[in-house]
Amino acid sequence: MHTNGQFPAANMPELFQGRGTRAYDRIARWLLRGLYTRIAEDVADVAPDNGTVLDVGTGPGVLVAEIARRRADLRITGVDLSADMVAAAQRNLGPFGARAAARVGDVTDLPFPDDSFDLIVSSFSLHHWDDPDGAVPELARVLKPGGRLAVYDFERAPFDMLVSAARSRSLLTGRPARRDLIRTGVPVFPRCARHVMTAAPA
Ligand SMILES: C[S@@+](CC[C@H](N)C(=O)[O-])C[C@H]1O[C@@H](n2cnc3c(N)ncnc32)[C@H](O)[C@@H]1O
């Protein structure tokens, strides 16, 4: 647990299965849509043509759907620890066919080969990861050389753990990490942090 003013890193599986998934799915699709629109626009601006995108902790896959709506050339995969969330994501992504998919997986043990993705995005999942430190080598492993990792979360999410884990292992040493605040369009939390790290080029 972190005590330096940051959120503790802890999953809350009871929130993300069964009835919790059904409630979250509705909230994500209706109340939070502006947030996913904002992040999807970021992704649509920077993803390379015909690129591959991973959304870590995708929940019901609403961000994946918003990205797919904007960029028909991308292949986008959502991954989540919760099988119920993945089932909800698969329902929401049905209209996009093979270009948008979701599967079960843990950020510390991602079910993908090395160098799979041009861009990794994650929204409001970091503060639920049990082991942000252990996530970094996996994120770096599946990111292609020069690829970009963009993590969006509450300002007090444990971003510093990602930074120190990357620094101590000399990972994600491309362009200097950058953190800023963006508007979410959601009245109850009008801003969130966006933290961008880059894999070293080949
Ligand atoms: C608050 S929800 C966010 C869902 C979605 N990204 C969004 O923005 O609405 C957090 C999600 O992170 C997932 N999660 C928590 N720990 C994880 C881990 N270690 N690996 C992958 N997903 C994880 C949870 O199952 C949950 O679906």
Image (cartoon, rainbow, N blue to C red):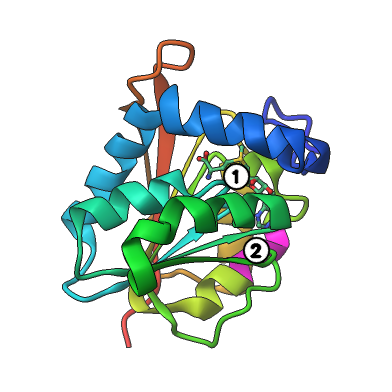
Name the quadrant of the C terminus. Answer: bottom left
Name the quadrant of the N terminus. Answer: top right
Gap in Å between the C-alphas at discs 2 and 1?
10 Å
Position of 131 compared to 183: left or right? right
Magenta-span inclusion, residue 134 = yes
- Which amino acid lies under the numbered mark 1 shown in the image of this protein? Ser
Mark 2 CB lies closer than 8 A to ligand 1: yes
Position of 69 compared to 59: left or right? left
Residue bearing mark 2: 107
Q: Is residue 155 visible?
A: no
| Crowdedness near tag 1: few (<14), some (14–19) or many (≥20) residues, C-alpha within 10 Å | many
Q: Nearer the viewer, residue 44 or 89?
A: 89
How many numbered marks are there? 2
- Which amino acid lies under the numbered mark 2 shown in the image of this protein? Val
Quarter occupied by residue 31: top left
Q: Nearer the viewer, residue 102 or 181?
A: 102
Residue bearing mark 1: 125
Magenta span? 133-137
